[in-house]
Amino acid sequence: MIGTMRINLIVATVAGIFTFALSIGNNLLLSTCLKSVYSFLILFVLSFGFRWVLGLMIGAEHAAVGTAQSLPAEDSPVGQSLDLTTPDLDDETRQMMKANLGDNNVSTGTDMQFSPLNPPKLVTKNNLDPEQLAGALRRMSED
């Protein structure tokens, strides 16, 4: 476990005081004190669980570090350094970039022409037979 019982006491005391302060306006004094004690006890126990989980996580981390250090290190320089420099642009690279830019400009001018969007028109039926509408409504209400 990580830490001491002092951490549990501090967390539980803060929770008890917070619960007391929030419930004193709405409850009787006995009810408020009882809720504060419950809050204190619950968070005191939960702090043990939280400290135990943290201890397991840190213990597993230390075990992983210990096994990594115990393995023999290879003398391979692969992965030991990182080169963050960009290569210099030579003439061939510049020519390739100019050729690619030139091809894109030509194709956009001939292939891509503007054409407006022409959606289909919606047609409404204004002259419907009232008897057909009533029959359709009756069939829909039966289902």
Image (tube, grey):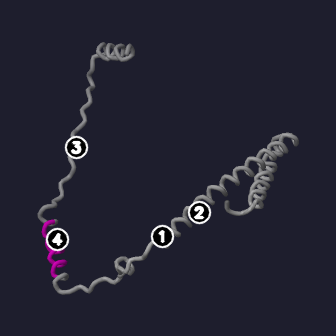
Marking on residue 123: none
Q: Residue at x 17, y 86 (%)?
A: 91
Callout 3 amino acid:
Pro
| Secondary structure under the numbered disc 3 in the rendered image | loop
The residue at which mark 4 appears reads as 105
The mark lying in front, picked from 4 and 3, is 4
Nearer mark to the viewer, of 1 and 3: 1
Q: Amino acid at mark 1?
A: Ala
Q: Nearer the viewer, residue 54 or 114?
A: 54
- Mark 2 vs mark 4: which is more N-terminal? 2
Q: N-terminal of the two: label 1 or label 3?
A: 1
Residue for badge 3: 119
Q: Nearer the viewer, mark 2 or mark 4?
A: 2
Of label 1 and label 4, which has the lower sequence position?
1
Q: Which residue sits at x=27%, y=20%? A: 128
**Mark nearer the N terminus (2 vs 3):** 2
Q: Is residue 86 above or below residue 47?
A: below
CA–CA distance in space, label 4 to label 3: 30 Å
Q: Please tell me whether mark 1 sits on a helix, a strand or a loop.
A: helix
Residue found 55% across the figure and 64% down from its top: 61
Q: Is residue 102 above or below residue 2?
A: below
Q: Position of residue 26 (x, y in %)?
A: 81, 41
Q: Which residue is mark 1?
A: 68
For disc 3, the neighbor class at 10 Å (few under 14, some 14 to 19, many from 20) is few
Considering every residue shown, the one lying at the far right of the view is 29
Mark 2 lies on residue: 59
Snapshot quadrant of residue 60: bottom right
Q: CA distance from mark 1 to mark 3?
A: 65 Å
Question: Which contiguous range is marked in magenta?
Answer: 95-107
Q: Is residue 108 above or below residue 93?
A: above
